[in-house]
Image (spheres, rainbow, N blue to C red):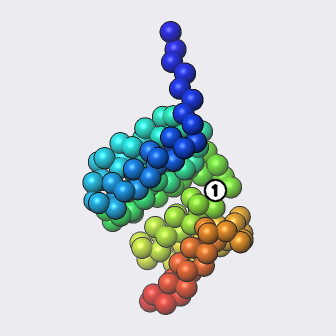
Amino acid sequence: MAWTVNPAKDEIAMLMEAGFICRAANKFQEARDLFAGVRALLPKSDVPEVALGTVFFQQSDFDTAITYYQRALEKNPRSAYAYAHLGEAYLFKLEREKARSYLQKAIELDARGNTASMARHLLTLADSVR
């Protein structure tokens, strides 16, 4: 017997929000558990992969964060959200050219959205960091 779970969008949003709250409270394992649960519920979505990456990013584990962002792009090659976070991770690794490339891609994919705004701010930061 196979189980089928079809959570409502507001239930997924609540789980994601709980994960972000845990991450902000430095409860990293709890955040990872919540985001992994969302990933299990939405296996084709790039969003929980990016969220998992942000947990590792906050812990300064940029390489693991990059791995999650790349997984997100495997699921959705047009994820501006994943490209912006990937660019941010490379910026913190001081790999400015890679960072710029990914941030530009995020802007290209989401020219007027919040993700593009984040990417533009990160590009400004990249230009100021030497």
Q: In the picture provided, is 79 more to the left or to the right than 128?
A: right
Q: Is residue 25 left or right of residue 107?
A: left
Q: Position of residue 22 (x, y in %)?
A: 33, 54
- Residue pictured at 69% horizontal, 66% vertical: 110
Q: Amino acid at mark 1?
A: Ser
Q: Quadrant of the C terminus?
A: bottom left
Query: Would you call the spot at circle 1 few (<14 residues within 10 Å), some (14-19), or many (20 or more)?
Result: many
Q: Determine whether 9 is above or below 63 in the image.
A: above
* Residue 26: percent from left, percent from top: 28, 59
Instruction: From the viewer's perspective, tell me whether residue 2 is left or right of residue 57.
Output: right
Coordinates of residue 17 in the picture (x, y in percent): 44, 52
Q: Horizontally, is 126 left or right of 109 in the view? A: left
The quadrant in which residue 64 appears is bottom left
Residue for point 54% across, 44% down: 10
* Residue at which label 1 appears: 79
State the SS at label 1. Answer: loop
Observer able to see residue 81: yes
Residue 100, image x, y percentages: 58, 76
